[in-house]
């Protein structure tokens, strides 16, 4: 993929004049290592039907529900079908 019309980041004034260095750890995947693949991102919200909108499902329960859905899809499709971040994002790829 070639990006066109890429603009440089605008620097804030006095960057680097205060603060301190810190170590940053990040988990990520190099997407260029997955040729001919499209990755789709979905924003989801798991709710209890009939419950007030402000009532949130606990994260542990949401993960268990999505895991059960993924197992059923795995049994049906024969492959991993999506990745759930445990909160609001689902990622799916197609080859």
Image (tube, rainbow, N blue to C red):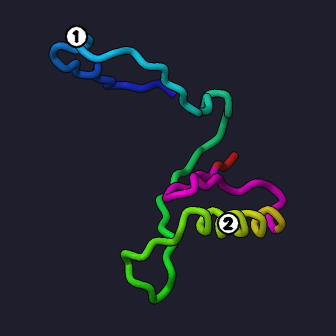
**Image label count:** 2
Q: Please give the name of the residue rendered at 52% of the width and 52% of the height, measured from the top-left corner.
A: 41
Tell me which segment is drawn in magenta: 76-92
Query: Left of 44 or right of it: where is 11?
Result: left
Please state, as top left, top right, bottom left or bottom right, where the C terminus lies in the image.
top right
Q: Where's residue 34, x and y in %?
A: 67, 33
| Near-viewer residue (44 or 86) | 86
Residue 86 against residue 2 in the figure, above or below:
below
Q: Callout 1: few (<14), some (14-19), or many (20+) C-alpha neighbours within 10 Å?
A: few
Q: Where's residue 76, x and y in %?
A: 81, 68
Q: Residue furthest left?
A: 13
Tell me which corner region of the image, top left, top right, bottom left or bottom right, holds residue 29: top right
Residue 86 included in the magenta stretch of the image? yes
Q: Earlier in the sequence, mark 1 or mark 2?
A: 1
Q: Where's residue 90, x and y in %?
A: 56, 56
Residue 60 included in the magenta stretch of the image? no
Viewer can see residue 94: yes
Label 1, label 2: how many angstroms apart (C-alpha)? Answer: 46 Å
Residue 63 against residue 29 in the figure, above or below:
below
Determine which residue is flagged by label 2.
64
Q: Please give the name of the residue rendered at 22% of the width and 10% of the height, measured from the top-left corner.
A: 17
Query: Left of 55 or right of it: where is 8?
Result: left
Q: Residue furthest bottom?
A: 50
Residue 83 against residue 69 in the figure, above or below:
above
Determine which residue is flagged by label 1.
17
Q: Where's residue 68, x and y in %?
A: 73, 68
Query: Left of 62 or right of it: where is 73?
Result: right
Q: Please give the name of the residue rendered at 42% of the width and 26% of the height, measured from the top-left corner.
A: 3
């Amino acid at each position: 993929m070639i990006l066109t019309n890429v603009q440089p980041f605008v620097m804030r004034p006095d960057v680097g004049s205060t603060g301190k260095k810190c170590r940053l750890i990040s988990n990520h995947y190099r997407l260029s290592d997955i040729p001919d693949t499209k990755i789709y991102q979905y924003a989801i919200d798991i709710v209890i039907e009939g419950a007030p909108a402000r009532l949130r499902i606990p994260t542990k329960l949401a993960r268990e529900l999505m895991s059960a859905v993924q197992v059923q899809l795995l049994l049906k499709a024969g492959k991993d079908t999506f990745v759930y971040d445990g909160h609001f994002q689902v990622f799916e790829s197609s080859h």
